[in-house]
Image (tube, helix red, strand yellow):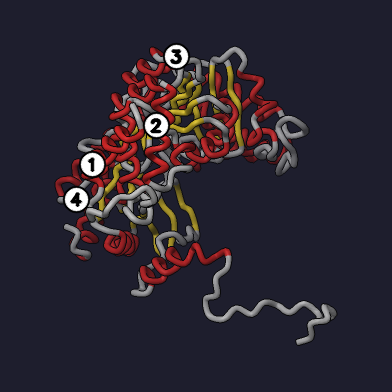
């Protein structure tokens, strides 16, 4: 699965969580721009994990601040499996 | 002001609310000021002026029924327990002034660990200075770099802090969700060490974990299992060993974590295990090694209390009856509760928001009832809770009095 395909799939997963319909770019932040609180983050991460059958540990989540970083992280994790 | 560098240091003068390291607490300070501005008594600053019994204290000069102490089995004023503590205080002095691995292990420490072995029928027992340190120490020590800790998202702060202190990968799953646990276990990379961390009773809502299913799944995936039974020891299970015993899976649990500050009625924490190499943890577990051991009097009271809890089945039955009675009564009054039925001795009453929760808390205190006010981030789903925990020493009449107080305060604050 290449980065573009992962990007497309994450965009569709993010839809129901993006309550304010904020435009999403590579540098869009989850905490700031999308205003995700900790409960939203948990549900969103679980949805991503289920979609790609991966684990994004809390340690890895701490390094992910922007949308682009998430796509990169998922791409890396998918490469490993 | 000279610039020669010879002038004495001047203290930094801050104008107004100049930013410093404390600025990050400003939202919390503002929230508290707002809450207390209307004459509301501070729910996090109550003083027990005198304590009359496990269920009664004087607060603000008024006799108050205690319904938020976790003193489940009412052991704090047990004459035999007090006597054991007094004797140890005379025989061994006030404190050990030392680590368990240096000069801080006295006969009462060994005896307390023996009492735990008897209580749980397990080969290994290790006493920590608090329950918090037991979780902190065991989790951070056994799950190392490259290992995975898989834990319930509603885990206690001590479990989260144990994860933070260790080097393992931390993977939370949705509260009490068996499928979510299984999915995460399945995805852990081949060959990585796995520790599943669960609680018997979750203290915020008083709900019980499906340990039977979860422990079976963890074992199928080759994970070690740690269960925190802080809120179930002495009360749940045939021998009071906790939810894992009640659900028939205690033999498959690798580590049970517990505390002396609830049913046992004093302070301290512990881990019990049948692992053949358990003893090595005393040398590698930093929150065990690098702190002073508990005073011998505390160990003597804990050991006496634990052995008495082994014979506590009548009191357990009474506590269950009262928990169910309180749950049913509160529901009948129209309160919204954390669980559909009483699953433990914790009954959580869900408040509409923090402001009204604090008002209700104050109104109950005026009636002469103390409960815990629990608020985010300690609570799941941003809930404000009035958490009631029953004691075996509460009588049936006490429960009726408590219900009347809830009715009064609930109407006064418009919650029911």
What chain is tagged by disc 4? B
Q: Position of residue B304 (x, y in %)?
A: 56, 30
The answer to whether mark 2 and mark 1 are in CB contact below 8 A is no
Report the residue marked by disc 2. A75
Q: Between residue B395 and residue A44, name the one nearer to us.
A: A44
Q: Nearer the viewer, mark 4 or mark 1?
A: 4
Q: Nearer the viewer, mark 2 or mark 3?
A: 2
The answer to whether dots 2 and 1 both sit on one chain is: no
Could you tell me how far apart the alpha carbons at marks 2 and 3 are, in whole angstroms? 28 Å
Q: Position of residue B339 (x, y in %)?
A: 24, 39
- SS assignment at label 3: loop
What chain is tagged by disc 2? A
Could you tell me how far apart the alpha carbons at marks 1 and 3 are, in whole angstroms? 39 Å
Report the residue marked by disc 1. B327
Dot 4 alpha-carbon crowd within 10 angstroms: few under 14, some 14 to 19, many 20 or more = some
Q: Which mark is residue B222?
A: 3
Q: Identify the mark nearer the N-term, 4 or 1.
A: 1
Instruction: Tell me the quarter of the picture where residue B89 sits.
Output: top right
- SS assignment at label 1: helix
Could you tell me how far apart the alpha carbons at marks 4 and 3 are, in whole angstroms? 43 Å
Q: Which mark is residue B335?
A: 4
Q: Position of residue B134 (x, y in %)?
A: 56, 34
Q: Nearer the viewer, mark 1 or mark 3?
A: 3
The residue positioned 67% from the left and 27% from the top of the image is: B284
Q: Can you say whether B12 is above or below B368 in the image?
A: below
- SS assignment at label 2: helix
Q: Identify the mark nearer the N-term, 1 or 3.
A: 3
């Amino acid at each position: 699965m290449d980065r573009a395909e992962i990007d497309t799939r994450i965009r569709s997963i993010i839809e129901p969580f993006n309550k304010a319909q904020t435009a999403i770019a590579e540098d869009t932040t989850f905490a700031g721009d999308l205003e995700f609180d900790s409960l939203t983050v948990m549900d969103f991460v679980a949805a991503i994990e289920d979609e790609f059958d991966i684990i994004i540990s809390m340690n890895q989540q701490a390094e992910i601040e922007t949308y682009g970083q998430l796509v990169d992280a998922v791409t890396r994790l998918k490469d490993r499996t | 002001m000279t610039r020669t560098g010879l002038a004495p240091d001047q203290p930094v003068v801050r104008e107004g609310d100049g930013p410093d390291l404390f600025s990050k607490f400003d939202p919390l300070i503002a929230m508290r000021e707002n809450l207390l501005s209307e004459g509301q008594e501070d729910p996090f600053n109550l003083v027990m002026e005198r304590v009359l019994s496990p269920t009664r204290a004087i607060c603000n000069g008024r006799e108050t029924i205690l319904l938020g102490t976790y003193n489940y089995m009412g052991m704090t004023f047990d004459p035999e327990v007090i006597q054991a503590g007094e004797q140890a205080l005379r025989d061994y002095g006030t404190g050990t002034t030392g680590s368990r691995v240096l000069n801080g292990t006295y006969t009462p420490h060994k005896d307390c660990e023996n009492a735990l072995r008897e209580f749980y029928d397990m080969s290994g027992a290790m006493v920590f200075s608090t329950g918090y340190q037991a979780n902190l120490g065991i989790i951070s020590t056994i799950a190392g770099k490259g290992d995975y800790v898989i834990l319930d998202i509603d885990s206690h702060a001590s479990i989260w802090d144990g994860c933070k202190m260790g080097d393992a990968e931390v993977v939370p799953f949705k509260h009490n969700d068996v499928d979510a646990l299984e999915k995460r276990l399945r995805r852990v990379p081949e060959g990585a060490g796995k520790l599943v961390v669960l609680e018997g009773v979750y203290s915020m809502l008083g709900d019980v974990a499906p340990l039977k299913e979860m422990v079976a799944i963890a074992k199928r995936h080759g994970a070690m299992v740690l269960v925190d039974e802080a809120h179930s020891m002495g009360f749940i299970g045939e021998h009071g060993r906790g939810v894992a015993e009640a659900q028939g899976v205690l033999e498959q649990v690798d580590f049970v974590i517990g505390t002396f500050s609830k049913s046992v009625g004093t302070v301290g924490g512990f881990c019990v295990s049948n692992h053949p190499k358990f003893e090595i943890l005393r040398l590698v577990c930093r929150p065990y090694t690098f702190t002073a051991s508990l005073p011998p009097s505390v160990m003597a009271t804990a050991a006496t209390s634990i052995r008495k809890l082994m014979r506590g089945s009548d009191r357990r039955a009474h506590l269950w009856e009262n928990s169910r009675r309180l749950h049913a009564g509160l529901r009948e009054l129209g309160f919204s509760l954390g669980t559909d039925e009483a699953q433990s001795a914790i009954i959580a009453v869900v408040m509409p928001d923090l402001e009204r929760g604090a008002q209700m808390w104050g109104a109950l205190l005026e009636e002469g009832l103390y409960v815990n006010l629990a608020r985010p981030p300690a609570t799941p789903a941003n809930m404000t809770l009035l958490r009631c925990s029953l004691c075996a020493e509460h009588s049936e009449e006490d429960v009726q009095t408590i219900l009347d107080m809830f009715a009064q305060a609930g109407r006064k604050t418009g919650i029911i």
